Each structure stands twice: as C-alpha cells, then as structure tokens.
Amino acid sequence: LEVRKHRPSALQRREVKLNRSSPMGSEPPELETLAVGLTLHTGEREALRLSLHFESAIFLTDDTAARLAADSLGIVAHGTIGVLVRAIRRHQRTKVEVLSILESLPVRSTLHLKRSLLNAVIAEVRAS
C-alpha cells in the first residue's frame, strides 16, 4: 500500500517482481501486545507477521516503533540509511551515488530523520 501511495512508478518497473502474500494464521499475542503498545499501523503489523512466518525475511522500515517491535520479536530490520550503506558494501551503488542520494534526502524524500544523524552518516560514508 505504501509503495502504491508514495512511489507508484516503482510498481511499473520491469525489474521489480512482486508477489502478494497474506499472513497465515492469527496474529501472535506478542505481536498484538507490541502493536497496541507501540500504535503500529495495519501494514506494519502485517509485514511483521509475514516476517515471523518467513524467517529469512528482512523487515524494511524507517518507523522507530516498528523497528522496536521487530527487534523485540527477533526480526532483522533495516531502514533507508542501512540499505544505502549496505549497497556500497555489496557493490550495488558507488560511494558517490550513495552520497548523492543521502544529500538529497531532505528535499526528495518524505523520510523524517534528524539532520545531525544524516550529517554523521554522510561523514562516515565519505571517510570509508
């Protein structure tokens, strides 16, 4: 839903292959408790349920509450910054490309992050 809302053009790309999955069974009580306590949205809850079902899955989110829930459930979670830095290590993006993306985040993205954190990440990428 979020991709369809915020970046619908991503769904039109030929190299993007999506499979729709639905969570199986009922929501585990631990997830239900975390979801209520952290006020997680329906999409985050379903993504966490799927991540519990598919143990090798990586949960992608920039939402702090959803990351806390993932951590509590033993689910590997990554955010935008982590994915970008990882792309350098995996030789999927150059350092210059990632720096350009990081520097443009404040004006090209709806991602909310502290400028001090972004500056620290940019400095770390430049130094690496």
Image (spheres, rainbow, N blue to C red):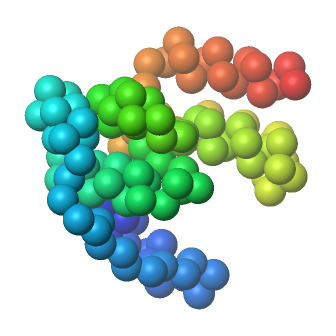
View extreme (bottom): residue: 14
33 vs 62, left or right, is left
Please state the horizontal and vertical placement of residue 106, each as a whole percent of the image: 47, 34
Q: Is residue 83 above or below residue 34?
A: below
Please state the horizontal and vertical placement of residue 72, each as a whole percent of the image: 38, 28
Residue at the location (59% across, 36% down)? 81
Please state the horizontal and vertical placement of residue 14, each as a whole percent of the image: 59, 87
Residue at the location (30% across, 29% down)? 65
Q: Quadrant of the N terminus?
A: bottom left
* 51 or 109: nearer the viewer: 51
128 vs 119, left or right, is right
Question: Quadrant of the rendered structure where residue 62 is?
Answer: top left
Please state the total of marks drawn on the protein image: 0
Please state the horizontal and vertical placement of residue 52, each as a whole percent of the image: 41, 52
* 64 or 117: nearer the viewer: 64
Q: Is residue 26 above or below residue 111?
A: below
Q: Quadrant of the C terminus?
A: top right
Question: Quadrant of the rendered structure where residue 73 is?
Answer: top left
59 vs 95, left or right, is left
